[in-house]
Amino acid sequence: MELFLDVLGESLVDTAKMLPFLFLAYLFIEYVEHRHGEKIEAVLERSGRWGAIPASLLGCVPQCGFSAIASNFYSSKVITLGTLMAVFLATSDEAIPLLAAEPSQWVTLVLLVACKVAFAIVGGWLLDIPLRHVLPHSLYGGYEGHADDVDCHEEHNDEAGNAQPIWKAALRHTLEIFVFIFAFSLVFGLIVEGVGEDVFADALGRMGFFQPVVAALVGLIPNCAASVLLTQLYVEGALRFSSLVAGLCTGAGVGLAVLWRANPSWKQNLFITGLTWASGAAVGVGIQLVVALAG
């Protein structure tokens, strides 16, 4: 019972830390949804398929808001699949401030950000340009090249049909996703505490070439605890740089959780989740191969 209460408290605190970022993100989303109109449509017509570049740069900002915004915008057909993936792959959540707090890890931090931004741009570009007509239309989703198709509408009225203030809609969305993330964090925390972080680190250390593949799976957990765990394991020497990159490439913060909540197509959500994992695992294995060949 004591273990459960400790994990419960930690999960509650960790999830509560996200609330300000989530609320601000949803407040921004609600504002845009009310006023997207002709201006956003015009921007989409000019640059809808080239969003991977700014998206990868925004994804580097150490918070969970941009991945949540990207998931909602993708669900409303405001951005493309490539733009969404660029945000996901560039997001590092808590890893950046943790590495920045260690002067000995500053070189690692620069390399990490550079690798993730470069891979996010390339991955987003591949999805939006050469692969756009290869992927099945039912899986691609998102912005389809026509601003008129944008479905940036939400139910903003109360039961009586009166328009709600945008802050109320933002608060409702924030609380809904808060419950989902808290439940996920609690389960994850119980597993880690039950198994033991040392056992977990030893298991990763014995995986050899497949370590980035497993680290990429850990990164999928929609909570900052995953990025914290991966970063700590790397600093302690239990995780290779390639595995750190793999895990943080899939660590899209709460983006995946928001995607499953906001996007009605479970096929697209499952495809994007799998693509995120495969992309992170591939870049991690690739870095590992380059290091092995160079050595």
Image (cartoon, rainbow, N blue to C red):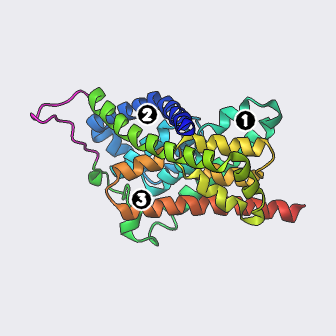
Residue 17 appears left or right of 113 = left
Q: Which of the labelled discs sits on residue 114, or is there none? A: none
Q: Nearer the viewer, residue 225 or 45?
A: 225
Residue on which the image places disc 3: 269
Q: Earlier in the sequence, mark 1 or mark 2?
A: 2
How far from the left and from the top, in percent, is residue 132? 46, 66
How far from the left and from the top, in percent, is residue 204? 73, 56
Disc 2: CA contacts within 10 A as few (<14), some (14-19) or many (>=20): many
Q: Earlier in the sequence, mark 2 or mark 3?
A: 2
How far from the left and from the top, in percent, is residue 206? 78, 61
| Residue at x 47%, y 51% (from the top left corner) | 84
Q: Are dots 2 and 3 in contact, CB under 8 Å?
A: no
Magenta: main secondary structure equals loop
| Secondary structure under the numbered disc 2 in the rendered image | helix
Q: Nearer the viewer, residue 237 or 32?
A: 237
Q: Which residues are magenta?
A: 152-165
